Image (cartoon, rainbow, N blue to C red):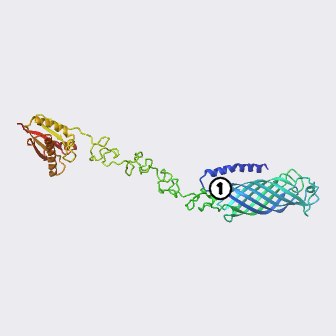
Amino acid sequence: MKLCTSLLFVLLGLAPLNMAQQTVRPSLLNAMSNVFGFTAEGGATFGITDYTKSKIDYNLKGSLEYYFPSSAKGNIGLDIFGQTGFIAGRIPPAASLNTTDRFSTKIDLLGGGIFYTISINDIIYPRVDFGISNIWFTAKDGNGNILPYNSTGAYSRYMLAYNGDLGARFMLTKNMSIDLTGGVVIGKKDYLDNVKAGNSNDIFYTANVGFSYYFGRLNDADGDGVPDSRDMCPNTPLGVKVDEFGCPLDSDGDGVPDYLDKCPNTPAGVKVDANGCPLDSDGDGVPDYLDKCPNTPAGVKVDAMGCPLDSDGDGVPDYLDKCPNTPKGTQVDKDGCPIKKEVKVILKPEIESLVLSGDANFEFNKASLLPNAYPVLDSLVSTMKRHTGYKWEIDGYTDGIGSDNYNLGLSQRRAQAVLDYLINKGINSNNLKVIGYGKANPIASNKTPEGRSMNRRVEIKVLSKN
């Protein structure tokens, strides 16, 4: 008795654990989850009473069951049942005042309990059941006459009993099973046979065969092809493809189901927004996982790596570049503008000549004077105006790169540009002579960048003094 009671409390304690397990495990629901069942069964009874010989009789039983949701192999459930039948025996105890050698007691039970069942391949379901019931009974002899103690009201004709069942259910279809069950009913009193003798109460055993029908195993409320009893996502929109759990497919595993995913092929591990598209924190059109410049200001045009465009390749992005068309290779400041080089002026008082470095005073590969040359030429203009009788020669030179004809023309044009400047400043053109020497007369080696820079020059020198 105590063992049965202890087992009952153990299973009651397991019920919330089983349900809690279901809420935290993201796995497939047990096939019997959230299912109702109705069972009808019948079979033999065998009483253990004060009569010395027991006789096999019969019983019928009907029950209604509910299986709690579970994602484990097992289910906890509750049931209510009604049962009717007979127990019988013969040869009463010697001390009995009964006058009959055999009895047959009609029994009616109404009760409920808790059960635990395990799924084996969704076909075989072993099961154990504990409960309590109330027994109404009438003890009669073999001819159907009410026995003396019963007829005189010497004891109550009902009593509390403990019930236990052990068996298995074998699924015939998704909705029906055949059941084999063995049970025991332990009464709280000792009058099922109309006799109270000894220290133990009356007990009877049952061995039953039955059928069960289940409601809800095939229901599919959202029409996704996964029965509600196994559906982890029961409210999937109609027509959406689902996995074995009844949840919408998420092919790229980004947490956004395919039917909502506007970027269905996102690489694994990439963070996405509500539309399933990779995050783009700075809004430049390049997702964060590809963006080499993740904090680009809003509205700035970027390249494929998410970095601001730098059209002239000077290292200053276009949106900050105040001199956007700087020639390639030119050193620039933080604003993207060419760094002004110091004008190298070589004055030779003894021969009264002047040398203008080409890099600092002319645009690259052109004959246009740069503003850097103006102060130096203006100082020369002052000298020329003080000595109006001097005759001057303006000689242009290039480095050794390129053809002879091209360099000869370039040196001539640069020398001419200096002459034009001096004339515009009021110097008499009759005092000026221009010659382009091209590659001739290098003053340094053309094999190094520094040497070539020195060779690109314009020399101004006095030819005669009058």
Q: Position of residue 81 (x, y in %)?
A: 77, 58
Q: What residue is disc 1 on?
A: 73
Taking the image as drawn, is residue 442 in sight? Answer: no
Between 411 and 143, the one lying in front of the other is 411
Q: Residue at x 39, y 49 (%)?
A: 306
Name, please, the residue furthest toward the left. 466
Image quadrant of residue 185?
bottom right
Q: Position of residue 411 (x, y in %)?
A: 15, 47
In the drawing, does residue 269 fall left or right of residue 181? Answer: left
Quadrant in which the C terminus is drawn: top left
Q: Position of residue 399 (x, y in %)?
A: 18, 46
Taking the image as drawn, is residue 404 in sight? Answer: yes
Q: Looking at numbered disc 1 in the image, what kind of residue is underneath it?
A: Lys
Q: Total label count?
A: 1
Between 132 and 99, the one lying in front of the other is 132
Q: Position of residue 344 (x, y in %)?
A: 19, 38
Name, please, the residue furthest toward the bottom. 172
- Crowding around mark 1 (Cα neighbors within 10 Å: few <14, some 14 to 19, many 20+) is some
Q: Secondary structure at mark 1?
A: loop
In the drawing, does residue 95 fall left or right of residue 291? Answer: right
Q: In the rendered image of this protein, does residue 434 appear above or below residue 67?
A: above
